Image (cartoon, coloured by chain):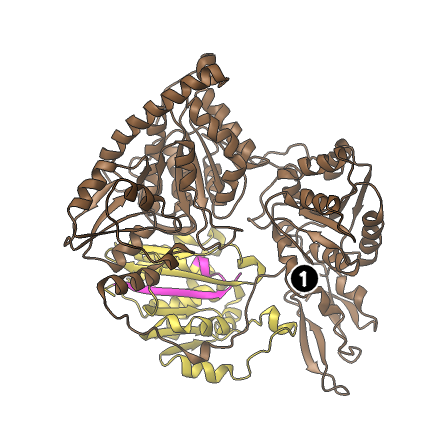
Chain colours: A brown, B yellow
Amino acid sequence: MAENIHFLSGNEAIAHGAFKAGCRVAAAYPGTPSTEILQHVAKFKDQIYCEWSVNEKVAMEVVIGASFAGARALTAMKHVGLNVAADPLMTFAYIGTNGGLVIVTADDPGMHSSQNEQDNRFFARFAKVPLFEPSDSQEAYDMTVAAYEVSERYGSPVMLRMTTRTSHSSTLVDLGDFTPQAPGERGYVKDVAKNIPVPVFARQMRVKLEERLALLRDYAESCPFNRIEAGDGHFGIITSGITYQYVKEVFPEASVLKLGFTNPLPKELIRQFAAGVERLYVVEELEPFLEEQIRAMGIPVQEYPASLRLGELNPDRIARLRAEICGETLPTPRTVPESEGLPARPPVLCAGCGHRGVFYALNRLNATVTGDIGCYSLGMFKPLYAMDTIVCMGASIGNAFGFEKAGHQGRVAAVLGDSTFFHSGLTGLLNVVYNRGITTVVVLDNRTTAMTGHQDHPGTGKTLMGETTRETTIEQAARGLGVERVRVIDPYDLEETERVLREELDAPEPSVVVAQRACVIGAKMPVTRQFSIAQEACTGCRACLRLGCPALELAETHPQHPNRRRVRINPVLCTGCGMCVQLCKFSAITETRKT
Amino acid sequence: MSNIINIALVGVGGQGTLLASQVIARAAMLSGLDVKQSEVHGMAQRGGSVVSQVRIGKKVYSPLIPNGQTDFLLSFEQLESLRYADTLAETGTALINRQLIMPVTVSSGQQPGLDDLDARLDRAFPRKILIDALKLAEELGNIRTVNMIMTGTLSTLLTLDESSWRTAIQDCAPARHVEVNQRAFTRGREVGV
């Protein structure tokens, strides 16, 4: 067969696999590192209906519905997203699929952009569903196609587990014959004993589930994605996922059992491999998911340094493991003294970001701020330093209410974004209304799901398929839930923002303040005006720097005050929001035309 | 360790490291080689550092370059080149764009800047090519071609066929920018030679 080779990221490869497998429905909520999966699936929108769902639970329910109806379906989420979608997953494993269902979880070892590094392989074991772990983009493609076949043959949803490194690395993929499969019409037939897990039927489903797992154990033994790569037999390494690549890099001579299908485990294959090596290691990223099961089989496994359990693995950490195992000394890593003491380059809120105005005001009001997940999380850094807590999507509202009910003295504000609000803020807000709270909720409405790359959501009026749709406004939703005090403000207007927030924080009723300013990047609006600081008028008081805007830079030392530096505005970055102008008591900042 | 060529591209978000990585990878692919590329997303548009790693060889396993094995550090910004100086092999070469983008931590006064940047660059990189890519890009009439100029210079240090590079640019660059990117690549090759 002629080669059809492409250079694809793991996420792109999954999208191609879904297309190849004849998938027809795909639903997801954005979440790094999974976001690009649905974005690439949307390129196949002539064959696959794609949507940004309101949250991961809804996405899971939508694809379950598609499976019920007989269509192959796909959902994808980051690791914490699976926590949100866990309820339907756990029970759907009992019910079983009609149309094949593939669930992609994209974990984040090392927490490049997450709040934890939970190992979602445990979810597959917990839910009792088959699990594939790709180690590169070719496997991401092949395993997605195979997963649909496994899903329909065994009647189970199938989990495909990616990590940041496999999702965002690009490797060569032979797509082979890229004509989509036509899985054949499965149709839908009413079958309450299969589809309704009331206790009398659920107990029978439970028995069938165990029978299914037994069949899957047999599949695992002969699954082409599990294979022994013979080496010199001194030690054997069992590994899966991206870690396999590091093991091959660092231990070229070792015998390796590469596992690509890891729930249920191929126990006979593992026993066979263990018997053929002198010392057995299980090398895996994050938790001892494989190791604990292998030890429970009674197979002796060498000790694994606890330090390797934390964070993302890489060839250097595996090289240190090798040095320990083989008693070798590693070459001393090169140190370059000129690299020391370099200033950090952290991510910051962009110049012109509307969130800045709200955080500035909340600081002046001495509010305790329960925060949430999004670009605005960056408001926690100095100089704004305007956030007290973050837990998970939507938690800000419940957390603020909890502070109130615990008797916390002083102002408390819940802060979350527009997409977060629709994702899981509605229930928290309704709870405040119902349980007679006075929580103030500030929704930072920048008209997009920004942090993950500017995706649409129920407030933007546009779908992933590119169609116009109804825009649900936050004000409508809040009033619909029974909140009477709903205010809409422009966060660029610092005085108005502070005044309204003060009123609402001090009001003995629930309030929702919607701070509306389109994301400067997302909106792609041309910059029509800018500002500049007249140097001779600048006293170096640095009041403007309290905004933390990256366009404001320290300039020359003040001629009369050698311990003060003036400030200037970088015209490459300035978007003309005008917030700094309002803070200057010396009228040193004036408008200029865009350069 | 083996015969893998390791290239790290570092810079600040928005400088075009991604397109450069894609072109390099595609040129390798068209030359019949195995290639893997890795990057960390998310902070690019918010002023953070970006790092992309490209590994080219007959068979590549890890998409991450083992420490100290980077053969070519393609740096689009001076501070970032220093930040990753210790990943370069003893025999490695740094191609450094003379642009300096001050981090917000410095421009806002939170952290001190560097007053000995040139001296540090000189000592940190015994083998280097310094390029004023921004100036060259301005001369070409498009400041967004800094990345392709740098890639052109890099291409003179690799053994990939020029035709692979040209096809790679054709395939990877947005259609309306192919022509200026080809010219930028040519300009970069002139610097290298």
Counting from the top left corner in percent of width and height, residue A232 is at: 14, 54
**Front residue of this view, candidates A249 and A256:** A256
Q: Where is residue A407 drawn, in percent x and y?
A: 76, 48
Where in the figure is residue A569, as x and y percent of width and height? 69, 70
Badge 1 crowding class, 10 Å Cα cut-off, few under 14, some 14 to 19, many 20 or more, is some
Which residue appears at 72% of the width and 87% of the height?
A562
* Residue name at image x 37 percent, y 24 percent: A209
Quadrant housing the N terminus of chain A: top left
Left or right: residue A88 compared with residue A477: left
The answer to whether residue A542 is visible is yes
Q: Is residue A80 placed above or below B77 in the rendered structure? A: above
Q: Where is residue A452 in the image (x, y as percent from the top left)?
A: 55, 48
Assign a secondary structure to mark 1.
Answer: loop
- The one nearer the camera, A406 or A142, is A406
Q: In this view, does A301 lie above or below B73?
A: above
Residue marked by disc 1:
A385
- Quadrant housing the C terminus of chain A: bottom right
Whether residue A594 is situated above or below residue A131 in the rendered picture: below
Please provide the residue range marked out in magenta: B4-19
Identified by mark 1, the residue type is Tyr
Q: For this view, does B173 lie left or right of residue B1?
A: right
Relative to residue A208, is residue A456 depicted above or below? Answer: below
Visible residue check, residue B61: no
Q: Residue at x 16, y 55 (%)?
A: A234
Residue B13 is a magenta residue = yes
